[in-house]
Amino acid sequence: MNKKRVIWIELLRIMACIGVIGIHAASQHFRDIPVESSVWAVSNFYHGINRFAVGCFVMISGCLYLDKKRTWDLKRLWKRNILPIAVAYIFWQMVYSVYRIGTSDIVTKGTRTIVCRFLINVSKSYFHLWYLPMLIGLLIITPLLWEIVNSSRGSQWEVYMILLCLGFQILPYTVECFSFPQKEYVMNVLQTVQPQILTGYVGYFILGHYLSHYEISKKLEYFIYIAGIVLIGTAILLCQEASLKSGKEVQTFYENYTLATGFWATSVFLFFKNHISKIRWGEKQEKIICYLGNCTFGVYLIHALIRNILHRAGIDSMMIGNTVLAIPVVIALIFVISLAAVMLIKKIPLVGKWIV
């Protein structure tokens, strides 16, 4: 890929990383403040507008891993791509398990109980670490997808798979968010056929490659922008309304598989690819951008720990009366502290490169 494209991808990677932090900073008090309060409404807004993050991360991976300039050797794939992710996942699963045990009263219940709790924690992904096993799953089938999208009819196959994902994953998931007569029967029909390879994040993965390698019409591009903004705005309002009715937090309408988040993530990806990519950067600026982009994996891994530590110190989305300002401040603090921690960890000989 050319130099200019790398820069917009790195910028999008940084933005997506900040978006993930935004989701987790905004949702800190989702379950312990009244849903009818203005504080909850602000949190819901910040949570919603940052939902592009995961979709963009997956699209970036598809853009890079499915690029026709790559050649896939299975031994190299498992050793150079999958193994480092697996090692990082196991390491941080253990770190978060130790942290949860250390900050609970279970430490007083004996060694056997502690060991059992440790093993239970490690066996189930910590709330944000689910992304790594999912990415490993995508990498496992990447050589197969690469052969398909880079064949002589690659673009047609990509459109076909994107439409299948839309029809068999995103549409049923979105429809299920709503209540309507005979819903059970409608959902049974929509879920009758489930091509498993396309009912996960493969759609985003292929979409990232398609949008980065093929041009779409300006009309379609602007339609995606408008749809993304309108749908995510509507989803935020629907979550607000549903939460008020149920008396507890509802996030259903902007989950990762909904039409709202799908179009919102796609619009952000397209904006960076078609517009941010045109910005001219100096050599020093490019170097900084690439370095920050290289740190985002580590920031993603460690940010939840930093968030929890700051929360225990009283620094969170409710640390001041103005939540509109508090959430961006917390996001900035988490990002900066996480980045500093990653920079230090990277300096550890041998180990650093494996865990961040």
Image: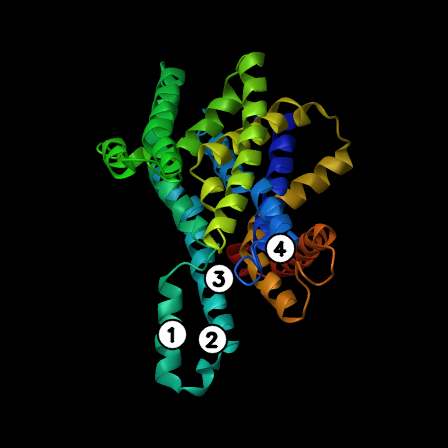
Tell me the distance, in whole angstroms, between the alpha carbons under discs 1 and 4.
36 Å
Q: Which residue is mark 3?
A: 92
Disc 2 crowd rating (10 Å Cα; few below 14, some 14-19, many 20+) is: some
Mark 3 and mark 2 in contact? Answer it, CB < 8 Å.
Answer: no
Alpha carbon distance from label 4 to label 3: 35 Å
Three-letter code for the amino acid on which mark 3 is drawn: Trp
Q: Say whether residue 298 is left or right of residue 114.
A: right
Location of mark 4 (residue): 37
The residue under label 1 is: 117
Give the mark nearer the N terminus: 3 vs 1.
3
- Marks 3 and 4: in contact by CB < 8 Å? no
Q: Position of residue 291 (x, y in %)?
A: 66, 44
The image shows residue 352 at horizontal and vertical percentages of: 56, 59
The amino acid on which the numbered mark 4 sits, given as a three-letter code, is: Ser
Q: Is residue 304 left or right of residue 250?
A: right
Furthest residue in direction left, as rendered: 192
Disc 2: which residue: 101
Do the residues bearing badges 2 and 1 touch, measured as CB atoms within 8 Å?
yes
Residue type at mark 1 is Arg
Judged from the image, the secondary structure of the residue bearing numbered disc 3 is helix
Secondary structure of the residue carrying tag 2 is helix
Give the SS element for disc 1.
helix
Looking at the image, is mark 1 or mark 4 earlier in the sequence? 4
* Residue 69 visible within the image: no
Which mark is in front, 4 or 3? 4
Q: Position of residue 170 (x, y in %)?
A: 39, 33
Name the N-terminal-most of marks 2 and 1: 2
Label 4 crowd (10 A; few <14 / some 14-19 / many >=20): few
* Element marked by disc 4: loop
- Labels 1, 4: front one: 4
Please name which of the two marks, 3 or 2, marks the residue nearer to the observer. Answer: 2
